[in-house]
Image: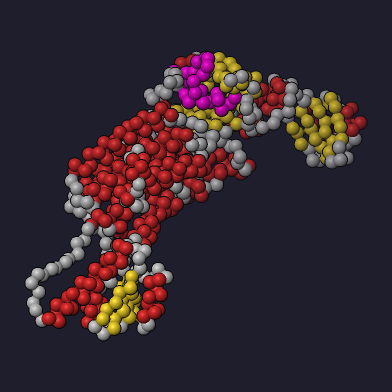
Amino acid sequence: MTAFKTLSLAMFKGFIRDKVTLFFTFLFPLMFLIIFGLILRDVGADKTKIAVVGDGPVVSALRDSGVLELEPYNDADAAVRKVKDGDLPAALIVRGQQLDVRFAQSDQVKSATVLGIINGFVDKANLAATGQPPRFTFAAEKVEDASLKPIQYLTPGILSWGIAVSAVFGSALTLVSWRRKQVLRRIRLAPVSATSVLSSRLLVSAGVALVQGGVFVGVASLPVFGLKLSGQWWLAIPLLMLGTIAFFALGMLVGAFAKTEEAASAAANIVVLPMAFLSGTFFPVDQAPAWLQTVSKIFPLRHMNDGMLDVLVRGKGIEALAVPAAILTGFALVVGFLASRVFKWEE
Amino acid sequence: MTEERSAVVVRDVRKSYGELKAVDGVSFTVAEGEFFGILGPNGAGKTTTLEIIEGLREPDGGEVRLLGESPWPRNVKLLPRIGVQLQASSFFDKLTAKEQLQTFGSLYGVNSTRADEMLELVGLTDKANEQENKLSGGQRQRLSIACALMHDPDIVFLDEPTAALDPQARRNLWDVLRAIQKRGKTIVYTTHYLDEAEILCDRVAIMDNGRILALDPPAVLVRGLDAPTHVTLQKGVLSVVDATALEGVEEAHEDEVSLTISTRRPAPVLSALAERGALDGLQVRTATLEDVFLNLTGREYRA
């Protein structure tokens, strides 16, 4: 067998036998995906709740529609107190044919919405009472706005982050451990090129990234999270590979400076964590302040995120890869060059 | 010994780190098939010398020839012909003994079936499927030597292979080293155990402060020392006065448990003792490399 194949195999075995690495590569990012996925699952589905005293055709129509959540009270005073205390935006008090709404002034948008909804139902009930057929018809239907559901931005974000973490840590820790244990020196004494050693480690990282992609997307697609991939999702694969190379190079740079595994791991965290937060791993960058969006553009992870988001869930085509691919390639070249300049065989 | 037949030729090699002259003009040759020891306390310059010969460091001055070639700069043609075991046990993470051998072998394009043979050579056949970190210190040392031999090199460099081993593990390793020499390999090894060098090596170079102080077969070094032989007897079998009166005795003294006689002519002393039936608890200690070191440096050997 060639050195490249055996070395890849050796490093792959070393990888799957290391439980700590397996945890941080697969379970740790998956935990974030699951926790955020579950917490944020119902965001946007929150309905406005109002207090209701009494019952009647309008109230039942409201209840059947499910537009508002109704909290029944026996006593009008109690219902109004809820509004006064700021717990609820409005109280609907029904006395036979008379419907009174008491609303809070503080949140005018919410109050206006509630008033509009109730008014609509009252009008409808009045119209029905006249027995006349309606002259204008009106129908409303919900649209699933794919890219806004939390799981849709969480999955690409956490996937990019997970790949960045395992590539940076994988290369930095391997490099430091090999230098400290003099494996590098042993390799230098063998008639084998540094390139084939390096590329076999990179191959392992790339394989790991593919498995990460499969696992994360698979879990997010479970009905409980409900990820929906868009048409050309497979375009994520070349992006995944480019990201692995870019962050592998970053790990080599970190590993060149760190003397111990502990130092390498701390340094890798300092590099990766802020980048993850500012690059939209856990929340969409579009919602961040403008200055933060500008700052985040210096991070390669931000561009990898954007690309992932575009091809995985926004249904964009290959043109969406142009910018992320160019930036990741450039980053890999520059950082890889720096890493090769500061590379040390020995302590 | 002509230089063409020499496995290693070192000529006036020098290496300084700042003010420190780690290697200060070292010269020697090692013949093919020879077991050559570099001996000395920590910091004597043994490891640096070895690293220069292996081609890991560039000497500041002097010349090194390995099998007729220069090891510096990295000489890819030479690398398959030398096997290096490093001071720290350098292994790949989480691989079994056999996988380590196969992986190191693959760096040289060696068929992985050789791993079994190597495991047998170093007596680790029953540990083939154990992960490296589960092995004992002695077993790891033997495994790392096996890794250095996977590609069947002509010259083997071992840097303190017996350091930090218990006596039993050291003896096991000696057997391995002798077996390697029987295969016709040239062995260059460093140690700070003088007794071990005396037993194993064809020739030893004694190093201190970056220089070679002496270079000869161990027996020649000891004989050349002209140090007295010490004969020790159980206390009471002979008085100090009687002992001093024996032919050839230079000095005799007694402590709580024994009588020690110093002599440069042990033959007449021993026969006189036998005549008197005074051989109870007899021990004869001749000079060792430790005495040679003491004589050369004027200080007690401390590993």
Residue stretch in magenta: B45-68
Query: Does residue B72 appear in the picture of this structure?
Result: yes
Quarter of the C terminus of chain B within the rendering: top right
Give the x, y percent position of residue B32. Answer: 49, 23
Q: Quarter-wise, where is residue B248 in the image?
A: top right
Give the x, y percent position of residue A71. Answer: 34, 77
Which of the pair A47/B1 is nearer the observer?
Answer: A47
Number of callouts? 0
Give the x, y percent position of residue A227. Answer: 26, 59
Farthest residue, direction bottom: A96
Q: Is residue B55 left or right of residue B266?
A: left
Tell me, yes or no, whether the highlighted magenta stretch contains residue A222: no
Residue at 82% x, 33% y is B260
Position of A189 relative to B65 (above/below): below
Tell me, what colour scheme is on the image?
secondary structure
Residue at 38% x, 75% y is A80
Residue at 57% x, 33% y is B160
Tell me, yes or no, whether the highlighted magenta stretch contains residue B61: yes
Which of the pair A101/B168 is nearer the observer?
Answer: A101
Q: Is residue A218 left or right of residue B195?
A: left
Which of the pair A22/A117 is nearer the observer?
Answer: A117
Position of B299 relative to A141 (above/below): above
Residue at 34% x, 31% y is A334
Farthest residue, direction right: B241
Query: Does residue B146 appear in the picture of this structure?
Result: no
Which of the pair B266/A314 is nearer the observer?
Answer: A314
Give the x, y percent position of residue A194. Answer: 37, 31
